[in-house]
Amino acid sequence: MKTFLNLIIVLFSLSTSCESQEVNQKIHINYKAQTRGFLYKISLNNNVLEIDNNGTLKSKILNSQQFSEIEKLVFNINFDEIKNNISIDDLAVDKAIEGVFEVKINSKTHLLNLNHNNLPVKIEELFSQLERYLE
């Protein structure tokens, strides 16, 4: 019995030790594309996903597996390579919808101004996955 108790204590110590070594990234995503008569907004904060598509609001609390999938998609985006792709001329004649994309990973923030109708592929993949979670 004493050996069994010691074994349980050792296993508990090992499991809490391994858990404390996990890297817990804090990721916050905010995206807003808006023009006259159009609004599309994505927000992911503390595992709570909200998407507002022209006044139709959907929300869900993501489980750890879903959040891990989102982390992988975010970490696959090379923010240093992506450039702001919105044209002032296109905005002036309502040819483009400006989308403001902000991602915070721990203390680092990435901010991009994008053409909502011409998003970079990796960002489009991220948004598509987020939308699938709300279907």
Image (cartoon, helix red, strand yellow):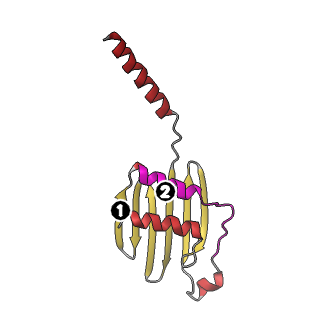
User: In the picture provided, is 80 more to the left or to the right than 57?
Assistant: right
Residue receiving disc 1: 59
Please provide percent x and percent y for residue 110: 61, 59
Please provide percent x and percent y for residue 3: 36, 12
Give yes or no for residue 75 being in the magenta stretch: yes
Of residues 129 and 33, the one drawn nearer to the viewer in this rendering: 129
The residue that appears at 48% across and 28% down in the rendered structure is 17
* Front of the two marks 2 and 1: 2
Residue receiving disc 2: 70
Q: Which residues are magenta?
A: 65-85
Q: Answer yes or no: is residue 56 visible.
A: yes
Residue 30, relative to residue 15: is it above or below?
A: below
SS of the residue at dot 2? Answer: helix
Residues packed near mark 2 inside 10 Å, few (<14), some (14 to 19) or many (20 plus): some
Residues packed near mark 1 inside 10 Å, few (<14), some (14 to 19) or many (20 plus): some
Q: Write down the quadrant of residue 130 in the picture.
A: bottom left
Looking at the rendering, in which quadrant would you find the N terminus?
top left
* Distance in Å between CA atoms under marks 2 and 1: 16 Å
